Amino acid sequence: MTIEQPKEPVDVIFTCSGTATGKMRNDLDVQMVEPMLETFTLATDEGPFHGGDATAPPPLALFIGGLTGCIMTQLRAFARRMGVQIDDLHVDCKIVWQWSPKDRIYETAPKSFEIDITLESPDPVAKQMALIAAAKKGCFVEQTLGRANTIRHRLKTPDGFIAADGT
Amino acid sequence: MTIEQPKEPVDVIFTCSGTATGKMRNDLDVQMVEPMLETFTLATDEGPFHGGDATAPPPLALFIGGLTGCIMTQLRAFARRMGVQIDDLHVDCKIVWQWSPKDRIYETAPKSFEIDITLESPDPVAKQMALIAAAKKGCFVEQTLGRANTIRHRLKTPDGFIAADGT
């Protein structure tokens, strides 16, 4: 079964409900809510250098896996529609962040994102380049990383949830 | 064993090497390269509506899991250092994207990011708010999503890798 592409824009909604369990482990119940309901069970943990028990990958492993998987999925999904033959696909992704100590805690910032794509394809390079350009626009994660997003935080209090994003 | 916080900024580097296997499945070898080497095995797949076999979570499940796990990790790591007691921690995250058909393919864009935090803590709300503010700055994924990042793409050709980001 393959759902037909909708004619109008639709929302794609994911939720994640996380519960702290082990020292640094988080059990994560993930749902795709729209366009259809699917559920997934994930977890993160930290290695010993961050005080965890390494029972699951760290959050950044899931993050880079999500980015890499997203662009790979889009390349294959669009290859069929754009008439580009892919005999094999391999993608290498590298992300560098900076971790800066600040008093007893620290601050973080991204430094670089690099994606190397190997498409085993008999089609001309120009056609492969057009496929990559389309896949970038279709990749939810790439489109998210390419813009400055606002994340709204709320804290639960005895009086209900209150905004936790300063004033 | 816990590594001491470094006195100067350090790079945190992750790599992901993805290979397309099943219809839409991607097997992902993830490495933390710096500040120490650790390896993780992940995979993504798609459900039937995207032509996959649902043998693994979709990329967006890893993505939201990475975001949720990252902020939860930071809240717990910084709570100790900031003297905030956490008896229990629960975080609900919701991301909405828009999926817009465009000829035979489609384009995507993020619409909203919402994070609801429940800290079971005897400490005053102001102290919990300060912890959240610090955790946001220490969360690699939040800091990445908050700015417009440039992602460099290259395509492998018989003459080596060439830039695949247009001109």
Image (cartoon, coloured by chain):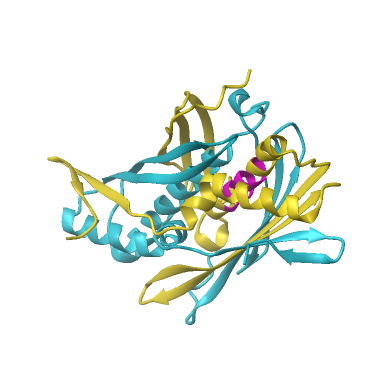
Chain colours: A cyan, B yellow
Main structural element of the magenta stretch: helix, strand or loop? Answer: helix
* Residue that protrudes farthest toward the left in the picture: B159
Residue range highlighted in magenta: B64-73
B71 in magenta: yes
Can you give x and y, in whole percent of width and height, for residue B69 in the image? 63, 45
Can you give x and y, in whole percent of width and height, for residue B157 in the image? 18, 44
Q: Is residue B4 visible?
A: yes
Q: Is residue B23 visible?
A: no
Q: Nearer the viewer, residue A85 or A156?
A: A156
Can you give x and y, in whole percent of width and height, for residue B52 in the image? 52, 54
State the image quarter where residue B75 is shown: top right
Quadrant into which the N terminus of chain B falls? top right
* Residue that protrudes farthest toward the front in the picture: A103
Question: Which residue sits at x=47%, y=23%?
Answer: B37
Can you give x and y, in whole percent of width and height, for residue B146 in the image? 48, 58
Question: Which residue sits at x=78%, y=55%?
Answer: B125
Question: Which residue sits at x=56%, y=73%?
Answer: A11
